[in-house]
Image: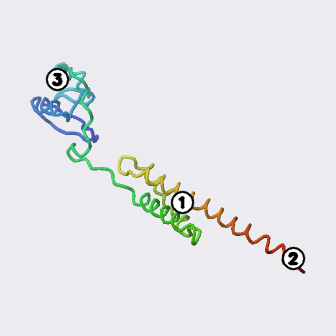
């Protein structure tokens, strides 16, 4: 009988050698899988166990997605990262009429918070690309707003100068 550590980091077993051979054939266990034989004191990899080495002689099997591992959960998309990207899109879209406010500021905040949460729990959360997109879009919206504001001010400067000279 054997116990193994699955790709999800959880312990499975005790299981019979035949079941473990079947898991190797199915790709659920590979040479890197940690195994504890009944009565043994130390965990070993399957590659270190002579009774399983003939089954592992072929090319290494690709890791299965976590959905194929019993009990493993898929990482969830971080809602703040998604919200940050949506805010960035809105900010860029509304940049001409209202300088993207308040969407560009909210996009920066939500995206930054989403990145922090993903960094704290990389195994349980995904969406780093969404958060980065939100940061880029929101920042671009702010830059365009500054540019539009500066162009608006620059257009009025000649009028102001003429009024000053007229007095």
Task: Tell me where residue 43 sits by quadrant.
Answer: top left
Q: Are marks 1 and 2 in contact (CB under 8 Å)?
A: no
Q: Which residue is mark 1?
A: 138
What secondary structure is marked by label 1? Answer: helix
Say which label, 3 or 2, has the lower sequence index.
3
Q: Which residue is mark 2?
A: 164
- Residue 55, label in figure: 3
Say which label, 1 or 2, has the lower sequence index.
1
What secondary structure is marked by label 3? Answer: helix
Quarter placement of the C terminus: bottom right
Q: Are marks 3 and 2 in contact (CB under 8 Å)?
A: no
Query: Is 129 or 47 nearer to us in this picture?
Result: 129
Mark 1 crowd level (few <14, some 14–19, many ≥20, 10 Å Cα) = many
What secondary structure is marked by label 2? Answer: helix
State the CA–CA distance, disc 1 to disc 2. 38 Å
- Residue 114, label in figure: none
x then y, percent, for residue 65: 26, 42
């Amino acid at each position: 009988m054997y116990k193994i550590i699955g790709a999800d980091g959880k312990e499975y077993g005790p299981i019979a050698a035949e079941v473990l051979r079947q898991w190797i054939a199915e790709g659920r266990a590979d040479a890197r899988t940690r195994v504890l034989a009944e009565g043994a004191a130390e965990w070993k990899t399957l590659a270190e166990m002579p009774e399983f080495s003939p089954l592992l002689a072929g090319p290494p099997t690709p890791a299965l997605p976590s959905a194929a591992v019993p009990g493993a959960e898929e990482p969830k998309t971080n809602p703040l990262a998604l919200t940050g990207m949506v805010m960035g899109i809105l900010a860029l879209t509304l940049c001409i009429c209202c300088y993207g406010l308040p969407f560009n500021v909210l996009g920066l905040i939500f995206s930054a918070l989403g990145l922090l949460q993903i960094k704290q729990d990389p195994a349980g959360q995904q969406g780093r690309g969404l958060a980065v997109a939100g940061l880029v879009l929101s920042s671009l919206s702010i830059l365009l707003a500054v540019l539009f504001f500066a162009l608006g001010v620059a257009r009025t400067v000649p009028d102001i100068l003429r009024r000053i000279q007229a007095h």
